[in-house]
Structure formats: structure tokens, C-alpha cells
Amino acid sequence: MNVIDLRSDTVTLPTDEMLEAIRNAKLGDDVSREDPTVNKLEEISAARFGKEAALLVPSGTAGNLVSVMSHCVRGDEIYCEAEAHVYYYELGGMSAIAGVIPRLIKGRMGVYSAKDLEESFRGREFHFPNPALVAIENTHNRAGGTCWTPKEVESVARKAHELGMKVHIDGARIFNACVALSVDPKAYAKSVDSVTFCLSKGLSCPAGSLIVGDEEFIKKARRNRKILGGGMRQAGIIAAPGIVALDKMIGRLKEDHDNAKVLAKGLVSRCRVKIDMATVQTNIVVADVAPTLAETYIERAKKKGVLLSDFGKYSVRFVTHRGIVEDDIEEVLRRLSVAK
Ligand SMILES: Cc1ncc(COP(=O)(O)O)c(C=O)c1O
């Protein structure tokens, strides 16, 4: 029985073209900014988002932490969605390392409004931490890969700026949002101060994320990357597949989104789970498997050769990606189906 791995789009392996690009990459010491392949990827990334500069970092977690450190000083406060990755899954790095405190805003399907931000804003009273940064997650992982529209981003960013705060997008999967809503990345980036995006998820690279922003911000980010131990030498071997990814791997994300929709519909009709179909916008499907415990559901699926991830006590996540084709979806549904 073949194993069908729906745990995450991070399990994707590099394409042959990426491996070839790695083999042929021109390399140098990137800490001294002498790796031509990294320089090229950073230039392409900045241009893609309409920003002045970009910085290659090892991971999305590093991208968020470096961005937080570059926008804030210790004791500052960050506003983010209540289940944002930067708060929920990054080991408290924003507090443990950057020394900032999160203030949580409950969103609807991962999205909150300018009004929500304004209502949770406490002001700059003497006893409060300094409100410095607003974080937006697009697509929102725990909400089920849901998208912010550029208008929603713009409206929150305008309010944040009015309130004297900077805005960062955790865009680990921002190209999924761009494809799902047919949006140019520049439309998301124009109203915010920085964006992180990942090469190593749906885009199939082995590693790497980028931060984009203005020159001054990226200069600070470069120092913070180094202080965290993220200055890499011949990092062109990471950048080379990244250039291939930005050129060739974005359009195909639609296939993952289509597969996720078919999967979600089939899971509801054949596998006795509950899914809020409004949240199935990209490549993530979050299913409520109650009364079965998530860990039990996952264990049973594993025995049938389907790998899933735990998203809460009764909540299970399925992620489609380049390693999954249409026939796999039918096979997953066949294996997980429950007789009526
Ligand atoms: C929304 C979001 N941000 C950040 C990250 C962190 O990325 P990495 O695993 O590369 O550190 C993830 C990882 O899944 C994510 O889903």
C-alpha cells in the first residue's frame, strides 16, 4: 500500500530542475553579500513584491522572528490574530528572544478588521507596553488556509499606521492567496512594511524564506539574522531552487487548491467529518472529527496509509501539495470512507 502524505506541504521534495539549478549555482560568501545567486533571488523577491530590498533567511519562523526584532524593541507589544502562527507555533520566540508581548485579536476565519484592531488598541498610556507592530497571517494556517483580500489588508494597515504601528505579513503561503484570489503580490505588499514568504512549502524548495521591505528595514533585518545565527555562507544552494520556484511553481498551486476542494467535499459526504466549507479556500482542509479524538483518527488513518496532522483535540488537518495528484484524493476518500 502506498503512503499518501497529507500532513503538510513542507514534505514536498525539490524538482529535477531545482536540483540541476543547485548543481550549477554560482556561489560565494553571502555573509559578505558575495553570493551572486542569493543576490539575484533577493532582487527578484523584492521586485515581485514591489519593495526596495529582500533578505534570505533559513525558515518562516526565522523570517517572522527577524522581522519582529527589526520592527520592535524589547518591551514592545504586537497585535496578532488569536491563533496566528507567530503566536501559536513559534515557541514563544517573539517573547523569549525578541522580548515583545503579544496582544491577541479574535478573527473570523483568520481575518480581523480595522475596527477589531481599533477596539483592542489600548492606547499609549504610561502603564502599557508600547504598541509597535501589527501582524497579519495570509494565508491563515489554523483557520484552514484562508485568504485576506488586499482590501482587508489595506484597511487594517491604514488603521495600524494611524495608530503609530508598523505592519508585517506572515505570508508563509502568500502565493496560495495570490493564486486563489488572482492577486498580484504587490497588491498585498504595498500597504504594509514587511512580508515574509516561504520557498519550502507549496513551492517545493528544500529550505528558505524571504523577508521583503524597505532598504533601512532590511539592513536591520540582516543584522538580526546574523545575531540569531542565520548568516549563511554559500547560501546560493538554497537560493538557486528559490529562483526556479518563483519562476515555475506558483501557477501550479491552483491544482492543490482544486484537489483540496474535492477532498473536503468527499470527506463531508463519505467520511462522516464536519468541515466549514467556507474555509476551504486554498490547500488546507481542517476537519472536525468529533466524537473521535484527533489522535485516534490520525492513528486509524495511518494504518490505512494516509498521514494527517493533529490540529486540536477533535481537529485534523489535511494539506494538498505537489506530491498529491487527483487520483490520490479519490484513494484517500476510499480509504477513509465510512459505511452509511
Ligand atoms: C503561517 C505560517 N507561518 C510561518 C511558518 C513557519 O515556517 P517554517 O516552518 O519554515 O519555520 C509556518 C509553517 O508552517 C506557517 O504555516
Image: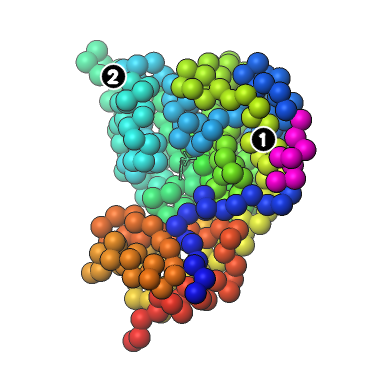
Is residue 303 in view?
yes
Seen at 45% across and 35% down, the residue is 61
Seen at 49% across and 37% down, the residue is 60
Q: Position of residue 176 (x, y in %)?
A: 57, 50
For the stretch drawn in magenta, the main secondary structure is helix
Q: Which mark is residue 309?
A: none
Tell me how many marks there are. Answer: 2
Query: What whole-number distance in Å separates the C-alpha atoms at marks 2 and 1?
Result: 41 Å
In this view, the residue farthest toward the top is 126
Q: Position of residue 172 (x, y in %)?
A: 52, 42
Tell me which numbered mark, 2 or 1, is placed earlier along the sequence.
Answer: 2
Q: Which mark is residue 237?
A: 1
Nearer to us: label 2 or label 1: 1
Q: Is residue 222 above or below residue 1?
A: above
Range of the magenta residues? Answer: 19-26
Q: Crowdedness of circle 2 by 10 Å Cα count: few (<14), some, many (20+)?
A: some
Which element type, helix, strand or loop, lies under badge 1?
Answer: helix
The amino acid at mark 1 is Ile
Is 315 displayed left or right of 327 in the figure? left
Seen at 53% across and 16% down, the residue is 223
Q: Position of residue 34 (x, y in %)?
A: 71, 20
Is 119 displayed left or right of 329 in the figure? left
Q: Position of residue 187 (x, y in %)?
A: 61, 39
Q: Which residue is mark 2?
A: 129
Q: Quadrant of residue 73?
A: top left
**Label 2 within 8 A of ligand 1 by Cβ:** no
Depth check, front residue: 247 or 1 = 1
The amino acid at mark 2 is Pro
Q: Is residue 58 above or below residue 250?
A: above
